[in-house]
Each structure stands twice: as C-alpha cells, then as structure tokens.
Amino acid sequence: MNRQEKSLKTKKKIFDTAIHLFNIKGYNLTTISEISRSAGVAKGTFYVHYSSKESIVKESYYQNLNFYVETEFNKLNHKNSSAKQKLIDFLFLELQFANKMGVEITTLAYTFNLKESLNKNNAHFSKRILSNDLHRLIYSTDVKQSSELVFNAVESLVRGIMATWCFSEGNFDILNQGLIMIEDMVNYYIV
C-alpha cells in the first residue's frame, strides 16, 4: 500500500470511528481525543485529516453521501429498469444514507451547512457531485415539466423528508414513508 492509500485508509478509519461514537455517545459528548484513541491514531493525525468534529459531519453529507449513493446505485441491477425506477432508486439511496448516519448527524449536517449559507460561504451544489448524476437521470426521463423544475422539486422533496425526520427527532420511518413520497412525486412529474 502506497502512502496516499495509507492516508486515505487512516482518514476513513477516523471518519468511521467518529460517526460510530457520535451515534453511540452523541456529538457533544464525543471528544477528538476519544475519536483518535478509538481509531488507534495520534491526536495530531486526526488534525492532519480533519480540522474539527464539525468538519467530519460536513464531510459526511458531501463526500461520503456522494460515495455512498454512487457505490450503492452501481450495485443495483438496472438492466431492465425504467429511467423512472432508476430515479426513484437514486433518491431513495439518499434517505438510506441519512438513516445510516442517524438523526443527530443528519441534523448537525443541516445546521453546519446552512450556517455556511448565512456566512455567504456556501458551496453546497459544487460539493454535491451526485447532483450531476441526478440531473442526468432526470434528463433521461420523459418529464411533464422542465427538467430544472423537476430537479428542484425532487431535491426539495428529499431534503424536506430529511429535515422533517430531523424535526420529528426521528419519530417516523424515513425509509418507508420517504419511499412513498418519492414514488408519488416521481410519478407526478415523469411519464
């Protein structure tokens, strides 16, 4: 394993450990020292890869969401699937990721990333690489409205489902109810 691969492996170990501890103990009760110790790295190594606990949460909803959706989407057998079904599957994977991360991490991700908007430092759409994939999926369908309107509608729906889940403190089934909402919207906008 070369140096870069080793560095990426260490960063992933720190990330996975932090998310695990956040979900068990809570974000506020988890320290950087504890993350480092549990990951088997020096505290200085933590700071080589992350500037703070907040940076881990922010990254979870950009790089790791992008990676998760792309990886899981490619695992699905879409050989005989319609473009509409591919779109539903793609959107549902975003909800699966939120469910995997947990309601606290999802809430914090919204909080931290929306704060960047207040500071006019928002790079949301440039960091969300999967938005390009979503655009391609929408353009491959037969839409009843403009593709841009459909993109904004489905993006807003998925974000809204996640936000409602956060506001309800996880008191509804984001996967089952979310899938129903996604299917309804996709069926409304796409032939």
Image (cartoon, rainbow, N blue to C red):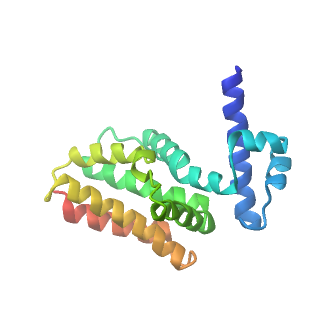
- Image location (x, y in percent) of residue 132: 34, 43
Determine the residue located farthest toward the front in the rendered image. 119
Quadrant housing residue 14? top right
Q: Nearer the viewer, residue 36 or 80?
A: 36
Relative placement, left or right, of 109 versus 120 is right
Q: Residue at x 42, y 57 (%)?
A: 92
Quarter holding the C terminus is bottom left
Residue occupying image coordinates x 51% and y 49%: 62
Number of numbered discs on residues: 0
Residue 61 visible? The answer is yes
Q: In the shown orientation, is residue 10 left or right of residue 151?
A: right
Residue 172 x, y percent position in the rendering: 51, 77
- Residue 189 lies, with reference to residue 90, above or below; the image says below
Residue, far left: 144
* Residue at the farthest top position: 2
Residue at image position (27%, 66%) is 185
In the rendered view, would you say 23 is above or below 137? below
Along the horizontal axis of the image, is 12 left or right of 159?
A: right
**In this view, 72 is above or below 101:** above
Return the x and y of residue 73 as percentages of the image width and height.
43, 44
Which sits in the foreground, 35 or 83?
35
Q: Quadrant of the N terminus?
A: top right
Residue 155: x %, y % from top left: 35, 59
Residue 81 appears anywhere in the view: no
Left or right: residue 9 compared with residue 158: right
Q: Residue at position x 40%, y 69% from top?
A: 160
Image quadrant where residue 188 sits: bottom left
